[in-house]
């Protein structure tokens, strides 16, 4: 597929130029993002197929598995191409029960960066997001300063361990605080056709040349139930996933997507969503979901 078919590129100010349809590696791990995949050879094949199709943005985290997705990425894609950008996250680890406890002290973050370097098989991490929030649902911003943990990552960036920084699960004030400490190239938050709290943040980031990466286009662990979405998808003869992804791409040029899958057939369906241009009536119907 050519880049236009994948939504084109968004040139990030001071950062990498990313094709707007990326790939999220979370589903390459086992059930509940814990342990190995059922079919490791298919996981390797999915990653290679994504890159062969033109994807140059792979989202991962060393706490997926833990270590599993990073090790599969290394097996599938090393040596990494010059235009391939792997974005990882720090700020959490996994416990023995598969929980996601926060781990944000400078010492913990340094250990996570070193672990990512080791499991990905590289000397420098391209982009590292600091995952900050959590809250009652586990995936929403929690107000408070991120100066200490983000400052620790900024120090590692100056030391040459990290090229670019981003933040995840943050509010507008935390984004501004991070930017006062070091440049950021991306923000990764929960946003979809029904969960629209970041409209102003997306616009502010676009004006600054910073990418916005929404996770959970269909609701994540609590699947989005929407008769409107289902009706629009049926009317267009496309899947609800494809319509939800297409809607996100049409929101703003700085929106980059990272849909995940563990199978090549579903990967193709996700990538094809980038070429779906929603008609005005479909956009109006979908916009009304969160109204």
Image (cartoon, rainbow, N blue to C red):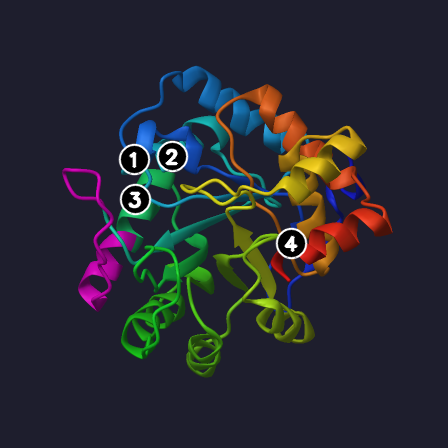
Residue position for label 2: 69
Q: Which mark is residue 65?
A: 1
Q: Quadrant of the N terminus?
A: top right
The C terminus: image quadrant: bottom right
Q: Secondary structure at mark 4?
A: helix
CB under 8 Å between discs 1 and 4: no
Inspect the magenta stretch and tell me whether residue 213 lies in it: no
Which circle's residue, 3 or 4, is located before the other in the chain?
Answer: 3
State yes or no: discs 3 and 1 in contact (Cβ < 8 Å).
yes
Kindly check if marks 2 and 1 are in contact, taking CB atoms under 8 A apart as contact. yes
Question: In the image, is residue 49 above or below residue 283?
Answer: above
Q: Point out the residue furthest to the front here.
A: 227
Describe residue 131's horizontal placement relative to residue 242 as left or right.
left
Q: How many marks?
A: 4
* Label 3 Cα crowd, 10 Å radius (few <14 / some 14-19 / many 20+): many
Instruction: Name the front one of labels 3 and 4.
Output: 4
- The residue lying toward the viewer, choosing from 242 and 209, is 242
In percent of width and height, residue 205 lies at 61, 71
What is the span of residues highlighted in magenta in the rendered image? 94-112
Helix, strand or loop for disc 1: loop
The residue identified by callout 3 is: 63
- For label 3, the SS is loop
Which secondary structure dominates the residues rendered in magenta? loop
Disc 4 residue crowd, few under 14, some 14–19, many 20+, Cα 10 Å: some
Which sits earlier in the primary sequence, circle 1 or circle 4?
1
């Amino acid at each position: 597929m050519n880049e236009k078919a994948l939504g084109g590129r968004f040139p990030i100010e001071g950062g990498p130029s990313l094709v707007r349809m990326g790939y999220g590696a979370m589903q390459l791990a086992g059930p509940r993002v814990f342990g190995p995949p059922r079919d490791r050879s298919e996981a390797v094949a999915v990653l290679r197929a994504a890159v062969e199709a033109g994807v140059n943005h792979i989202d991962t985290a060393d706490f997926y598995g833990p270590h599993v997705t990073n090790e599969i990425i290394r097996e599938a894609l090393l040596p990494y191409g010059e235009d391939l950008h792997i974005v990882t996250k720090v700020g959490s680890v996994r416990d023995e029960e598969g929980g996601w406890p926060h781990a944000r002290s400078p010492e913990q973050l340094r250990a996570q960066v070193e672990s990512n370097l080791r499991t990905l098989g590289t000397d420098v991490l391209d982009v590292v997001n600091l995952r900050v929030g959590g809250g009652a649902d586990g995936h929403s911003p929690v107000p408070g300063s991120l100066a200490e943990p983000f400052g620790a990552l900024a120090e590692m960036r100056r030391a040459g361990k990290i090229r670019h920084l981003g933040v995840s699960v943050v509010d507008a004030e935390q984004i501004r605080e991070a930017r006062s400490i070091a440049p950021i190239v991306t923000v990764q938050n929960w946003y979809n056709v029904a969960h629209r709290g970041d409209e102003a943040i997306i616009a502010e980031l676009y004006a600054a040349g910073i990418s916005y990466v929404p996770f959970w286009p269909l609701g994540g662990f609590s699947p989005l139930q929407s008769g409107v979405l289902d009706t629009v998808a049926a009317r267009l003869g496309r899947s609800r996933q494809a319509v939800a992804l297409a809607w996100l791409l049409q929101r703003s040029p700085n929106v980059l997507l990272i849909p995940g899958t563990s199978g090549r057939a579903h990967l193709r369906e996700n990538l094809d969503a980038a070429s779906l241009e929603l008609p005005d009536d479909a956009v109006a119907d979908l916009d009304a979901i969160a109204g």
